[in-house]
Every structure is written in structure tokens, then in C-alpha cells.
Image (spheres, coloured by chain):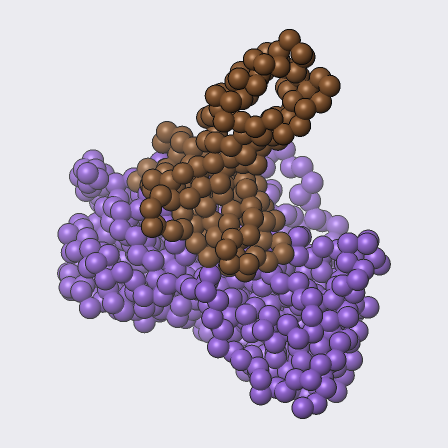
Chain colours: A brown, B purple
Amino acid sequence: MAGMNGNGREHQHTITALVQNHPGVLARVAGLFARRGFNIESLAVSVTENPEVSRMTIVARGDDRVIEQITKQLNKLIEVIRVVDYIEHAAVERELALIKVNAEPKDRSEILQLAEVFRGRVIDVGEKTFLIELTGGPDKIDAFARLMAPYGIREMARTGVIAMARGTKTA
Amino acid sequence: MAKMSGAQILLECLRQEGVEFIFGYPGGAVLPIYDALYDYQDIKHILVRHEQGAAHMADGYARATGKVGVCLATSGPGATNLITGIATAQMDSIPIIALTGQVRTTYIGKDAFQETDAIGISMPITKHNFLLRRTEDIPRVIAEAFYIARSGRPGPVLVDIPLDVSLGKIEWDPSQYNRNVDIPSYRPTYKGHEMQIRKAAQAIKEAKRPVLYVGGGAVQSGAQAEVTELSERTNILVTTTLMGKGAIDENHPNCLGMLGMHGTAYANHAVHNCDLLIAVGARFDDRVTGKLDQFAKYAKVIHIDIDPAEIGKVVHCDIPIVGDVKTVLRELLKYVEPRPATEWNRQIMEWKKRFPLIYPKDGQMHAEYVIDEIWRVTEGNAIVTTGVGQHQMWAAQYYKVKRPRQFITSGGLGTMGFGMPAAIGVQLAFPNEKVVCIDGDGSFQMTVQELMTAVVYELPIVVAIINNRSLGMVRQWQELFWSERYSEVDLQASPDFVKLAEAYGAIGMRVTKAEDVEPALREALSQKHKPVIIDFVVPTEENVYPMIPSGQSIEQMMLRKDLEQLRATVDTDGEEWSFADQDAILKQFVEQPSRQ
């Protein structure tokens, strides 16, 4: 019988938990991750089409056994209705980012072009800055942020990933 | 329809849940509840001396009866004093309801007098908790709390009740209370998967060296008959965890006693060398497994548990079966074929002879002797509670129980001070049973104030203090693993326990000689209305053996140094058995890893 620790390769998993929309449910989920030593890379929460149900999308890292424990421990919470690990499903992942980048007059057209390539939108133009809105998978946002870095990113906010299965399948 | 206050509704809900006792302590935020209790006849309130005692009493009551125990405390310090007791229940999956007062909903978050975030504090140590916000929610929340506490893998549930919620009056009729709860997001699995059960039966059929490893889940599910039948039909020997004591009659020839750190050597040898480990309602605690990669390393594992998160949590499992232990075992018994006792059974019996659980019967009053005598004098029928430490391990080794719910101890959390309050809860539930708390001089002093509670309610519990004037288990570790640097383990300075008992209005006795143990116990057990404290003054420098040091494997198992001599003194039946022979068998077993 082999021990359970540190014996598998780590992967990034996107896990969706449908939870009862009760006060304190976020604290239960966050507390569970902290207590059991699971790492959260991002967490996005909001209400669903059913106002009594919230959807949490959690990006976590771990080997297969850690991820299995995460999903089982989540399922054990009384207010968790269902847990789906999207690594097993074809799913769309999206994130929204707001990036405030330095935009000196000489750089403005270049930044605009880059934003256009990434289908970003400039939603605020200041004397020395642009505020750019961008949606996409986390890799796309990482890539855009890398391109903006030379101009100087003053501030960036990301929502964290939300995910949904393709086709008729639901969580 | 009459108007009722939240407090009255609460009591009515508790009555309909079959609550007999509330263990509690009043305070500002629960005044409406205490006012409602003032002329409420159907539930008996037990006034404790510290809220921790209330939680342990509710826990002891729940462990002994299988019903849900209830404790009640005010907000702030009342709630925080419950915490150790709630955590104790959580670690051992015990169904209790902790009711806590809370400041008015309008004051919550304002640092009001005696405000504390009971929900936040208790979140990691409860199965679930509720903050009541409206009086009309009380019946639904209480019904859900009881349902969650007792169903699936049981556990503690805390309900936080703000003052204005218990004060509020609404129209409500007790006939509206609905115990039939359905929580769509919480549906425990009771019935095991049939294919998995068939696979398990097949694995049992094919196994050459199987062992049953049975834990608290079997006790909770009331599966003694099923465990015993499975063992008898297949001649598979049974080792239990500390929480599993009583899952099979410990006097049964198929019972190997406890495994793990202070388990019997023969149980540990059996598990170490087995090729099939059948884990039944057990969770592979580190005090059981020691070094994980050495634990049952040749074995295929069948794991039966009601909590899916336990499967694969600590060890790899070959045949998982999620379900209630009793239900699953009943199904399994449909497929399991009888098998004869084999060479493997003989091998384990050899180990049992070679490494018996034994202590010197030399006229000295050793701790083990005292416990052995308690067992003999009570004819193994007492309900035993314990504190935590050496006395607990000796009690687990030497007090052989006959049935589940007879050995009541804090296993997972290891809460010193658990024993006496738990005994009070047990004695209230079973006024006609003998209840003995085997305690340590350290543990006893942690919750000694509850002696007053036992006196007030005229409970004839017997508290046997195994007094070695030392924090014996810590002392043992310091002796064995910390170069005998005895740091802060001396308890020479303790009160005179006899006088202390008398000061509380209990009976105190002191026993220093082996021949006085039995008469003292008989006198104590004959009491009908008074608790008895017996101060058994035992030697300080004695250790619990066998011992597998923390995080190590059976190869590092430490046995008593005088084992060979002691064995010679008892082995008088003239039966011959040879070590050379036995080592050859062992080799043949051990060197054939069966794992694919």
C-alpha cells in the first residue's frame, strides 16, 4: 500500500461548484481550502439563473489525489449542490481583465492596435493612461499583459476564470 | 393558533426530537431560553460548572445512546468554552447539537457585549452550523440541524440564536414541526454499490492472509452482529481501532484487540503481513498507520466507509465501497463464502503467544493491574469513559468491552478532561448501569469542577484516577525520545484528591496497595447516589507498551523489556512452540509481496 503524498504530477484544474446562495457559503469554501492546505489560484463567485444558487469557479493546482480530495471535501459541505472538474470535459473558460496602462501620445496608436488584435476595448482615456477591457482565456490575458508591460501597467484587475461546458451538457 | 416565543418554539422542537437532557449554563443572550425552561417539564436541564463540561456531557450521552446530545451556552465566552467539546465530537463523528446565544441581530458585527463570531469560530469544527436570523426559521433550522447531526457520517452542528430571535413571538402550532427533512444538496449514501460488494467478496475468497480492520464507523452503525458474523464465517481475525472497541466482543477468540501505536503486537504483525486489509468504518489515522509506506504494504485494500472523502484520503484503496457499514456488511454477507482457519490464523496465534499483552503480577499496584481489576470486578460490563494519556491506552488495552458504545474516549482530538463530564452524560442516560471513568491525575484536573454536577444530580459515577503524579504520556516520550529531559511533566503538586472529593460532597478513597484495589472498587460500585473518586497511587516511571514510535513502522516497535520473563511466568500450560519455526513461517509470508 503506497502513501498518498507527493506522488503525482501537478495540474491546474478548473472546478465549478454550484452552491446554495446562503450567507457565509463563500467563507465555508475558502476556509476548507485554507484548512486542508489546498491552493487556490483564482476564485469567482456569482449568482446563477436560479437566484437560490450561486456558482463558484475555482482554479486550483494539485496532483490527481489532491484534486480528488478537493472535490470530495467540497461535496461534503452541506450547502454544495454539485462539483464539476472541467479537466474531464470540453469547456470554455473566460476571464475579464481591466488594465490601466501608461499611454504617452507617442505610444497611443501602437497600444490601440495591440488592443484591437486582442479584441480589447479602451473604455477610458486619460491624459496619460488608457483603461483597457479584455476578455478571454487566462493565457490570452497573460499574453496581452506581457505586451503592455513595456509601456507600464499602472493597475490590473482580473475576475478569475469562469467556465462552462460546451454543448448541451450542464454542471 | 397561540403566539409563542422563539425560545418556546425551540424547546418544543427539541422535545419533538426526543431530547431528554440539555446540558447547559445560562447567560444574558440565552435568558429567554432559560425563562422558557423554568416551567418546561419535558426536558431536564443539567446545570454544569463550565460550558466545556456541557459539550462533553452531551457527547458522552450521544456516544453511549446513539442519540443526539444537546448542549446550550450563552454568547461570547459561553460559546468559546464549548469549542473544545465540539471539536472533540467532530473528530470522532459524534452527533451533538450546540445551541449558543448570540447578541441581537441588530448588534451583530458591532463588537457588542459578549459578542463573538460563533459561526466563524465553529466552522472548521462542526459538520455544519446555522445562524438563525428570524424566529419563524427556528423549526426548519432545528429539524435540519438534527437531521444533519445524526445522518450520514454523524457530527456536531451548532445553531447560533440571537436574543431577538428567541424573544420574538409568532403564531405557531407544535403540530407544524416537521422532522422529515430533505436537503437536496445533502444526500448521504447508505447502500453500497453491488458490483463493488461482489468484488470485495471475491477478494476475500482469493486472499491468503486477510485481516479485518474495524473502526468507529462500525460502532456508530451498530454493526457488531455483522462484523462478528463475517469474522466467524470466514475465520478472518479482527483488529479494532480505539474508536472501534466493541465492534466485536473483545473476549471473542477472533478479536486481536487494538492496532496502532499502542496496539497489540500481534494485531500490528497481522496488519503488517496481511495480503488483504478489509477496512470497515475506519479512517487510517496516523496513530494507526505510523509510517504510511510501510503500513500493510503487501495488502490489497477494501475500504468500506459512509464518507466518500475518506476513501483515498490517506492510503490507496483497491476496492472502495461507499455506504453505511451495517448495510454494506449485510449485503457482503450474501456473497461471502465460508473459509476455514488456515496457517495464517495459526501464525497470528503464534504472535499472540509470543507477544502477549502482559504486565507483572508481582504484588505491586501497577496501573495495568488497577484497570485489570476494574474489568474483573465489573465483570466487563461497566460503561467506561477515559481521559487522555497513558491511562487511556492502558484502559484500551486491558478493559475488554463486550459491546459497542461501552468504551467512551476522545480518540481523534485527544481531549484531556473528557472522561468525567462524559461519564456524567452516560450515567444520566443509563441510571442503572455502572459507569467508570478511568482518568489520569492530569486529565482529571482539567474538568474537575464537573464533580459538583455529578454530586448535585446524585450520579454514582466512579472516577478511578490512575495517579502517577506525572503527565505520564509526555513523560514517556521525553524518556524514550528526548533523552530523559523531563520538561514540565511533574504533577507532584496536586490537590489531595480524597479531600477534594469530600469538599465537593463526593466520596474520596485512596488506594496504595494492590490488595486494597478490589475492596475499594466494590465499595465504590455499591454507591447509589454519590460519585466516588478513587485515588490509585501507581508508580510514576512506567510506560505504555507495545509502542510504535510516531511516524515509524512495526520494525521499530518497542516491547516491554521484561516481556520474555513475564511470558515465562504465565506460560504454564506446557505448550511447546518454537521461535525458529515461527521465524521460518514469517519469512515465507513476508517475502511474497502480493501486490500487482
Residue B520 at x, y = what percent?
60, 71
Which residue is at a point 49% across and 27% down the rendered structure image? Answer: A119
For this orientation, the residue located farthest to the top is A106
Name the image quarter holding residue B280. bottom left
Quarter of the N terminus of chain B within the rendering: bottom right
Name the image quarter holding residue B100. bottom right
Asked if residue A94 shows in the view, the reply is yes
Relative to B502, is B362 above or below? above
* Residue B99 left/right relative to B74: left
Residue A34 at x, y = what percent?
57, 41
For this orientation, the residue located farthest to the right is B113
Relative to A163, is B509 above or below? below
Which residue is at a point 41% across and 57% down the rendered structure image? Answer: B307
* Residue B325 left/right relative to B533: left
Which residue is at a point 71% across and 81% down the rendered structure image? Answer: B170
Residue A15 at x, y = what percent?
44, 43
* Residue B4 left/right relative to B308: right
Which residue is at a point 66% across and 75% down the rendered structure image? Answer: B136
Residue A30 at x, y = what percent?
57, 45
